[in-house]
Amino acid sequence: MALTMIMPRNKKNQDAMARDARAWLLCLTSGKATEADANAFKAWLRADPAHEAAFADLKRVWQGLGPAVQEECAARAHDRSRKPVITGRRAFLGGALAASAAYLAFRPPLGLWPSVDGLSADYRTATGEQRRVALSDVLEMELNTQTRVNVSATSQGRTVIELAEGEAEIHSGAAIADVVAGSGRITARDARFNVRYIGGEARLCCLSGTLRLVHAQGVFDVVANRELRYDDARVQPPVKVDPDLVSAWRQGWLVFEQQPLAQVVDELNRYRKGRLVLMNAQLGKRIVQARFSLAQVADAERLIRDAYGARVTHLPAGVVLLS
């Protein structure tokens, strides 16, 4: 008995959206994408929920291919002289290797270029960039380097700021603002605060006024000159901090007080082109007490070399090995 496949009536629309998603992927990973391209991409995503779904499907495909692409690259590097057997799997991976730039767009090595996720944010800053955004007459935010923010509104007209990654100082006037960072929701009114969300960990510092954090672990009030840290699983008690140190980045400074060099390098990498890579675990444990001007971060490897005797090796793309 013959079987007849009945195709959905919207199959043509789905195919068209898939083609559009691939076209956007190629555009955004070409290395030539502009700010206008990023804005047009965001407009395309918002025009139809199905667009976002189509792009998410494509993204899952490439993220899933990542381990296979890396495995195949390693195998070819290990034995380039052996003629490969062209099987279905290898033929498939051959195509995957040819398009591996698309995978790298979602997980750029060493963070050397923005991911596609970053390009789709409402507001974003590049490495070393800082930006002021006025959301209304009474609500504004200062974005630090490598920051992604999305903005929406509730049915009651309250502004919701989602800090997807990075750091921002937010000034909330008479209007109530809600800020989401990871698993926490912060409510503020007539307050100024700094919120940092990197690698799944958040730091919330109240600079003036009072804040309220709602988390799965409970509700926490934070007053001026206090900072608390949280992640998905826990919230640490608020501690007293120097607000001038927390906001030093807004004055063009990075201040490190008794921090391991490994943490200092991670922070410097957020501000400089290329990448500093620590190759010596013992060196990374050295305690640092330092104050860097943001104008100095391009020469950070020289400062580390002079202060700690690190060996410096320069590689292409601004990658610097410290050993």
Image: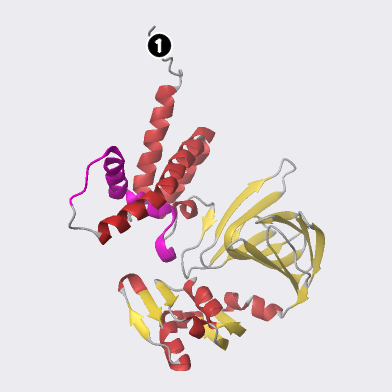
In front here: 54 or 280?
A: 280
Q: Is residue 66 visible?
A: yes
Where's residue 2, x and y in %?
38, 8
In this rendering, position of residue 287 left or right of residue 5: right
Above-or-below relation of 79 to 156: below
Q: Amino acid at mark 1?
A: Leu
Q: Quadrant of residue 58?
A: top left
- Left or right of residue 92, residue 127 in this image: right
Q: Which residues are magenta?
A: 83-111
Q: Residues within 10 Å of mark 1 (few under 14, many from 20)?
A: few
In the picture, the quarter occupied by the N terminus is: top left
- On the image, the x and y values in percent for residue 283 come to 49, 85
Residue under the point 61% across and 60% down = 200
Q: Is residue 62 magenta?
A: no
Q: Can you say whether 192 is above or below 92 in the image?
A: below
Question: Magenta residues: mostly which secondary structure?
Answer: helix
Q: Is residue 78 left or right of residue 7?
A: left
> Which residue lies under the disc numbered 1?
3
Identify the residue at horizontal 33%, vertical 70% (top origin): 317
Residue at screen point 29% across, 56% down: 75
The answer to whether residue 97 is magenta is yes
Where does residue 259 sit, x and y in percent of width and height? 60, 82
Query: How did the renderer colour the structure?
Result: secondary structure
* Rendered residue at 49%/55% (across/down): 118
The quarter of the rendered structure image containing the C terminus is bottom left
Q: Position of residue 64 (x, y in %)?
A: 44, 46
Using the image as rendered, state which of residue 206 and residue 59 is in the foreground: 59
Find numbered disc 1 in the image and state the secondary structure of the residue it sits on. loop
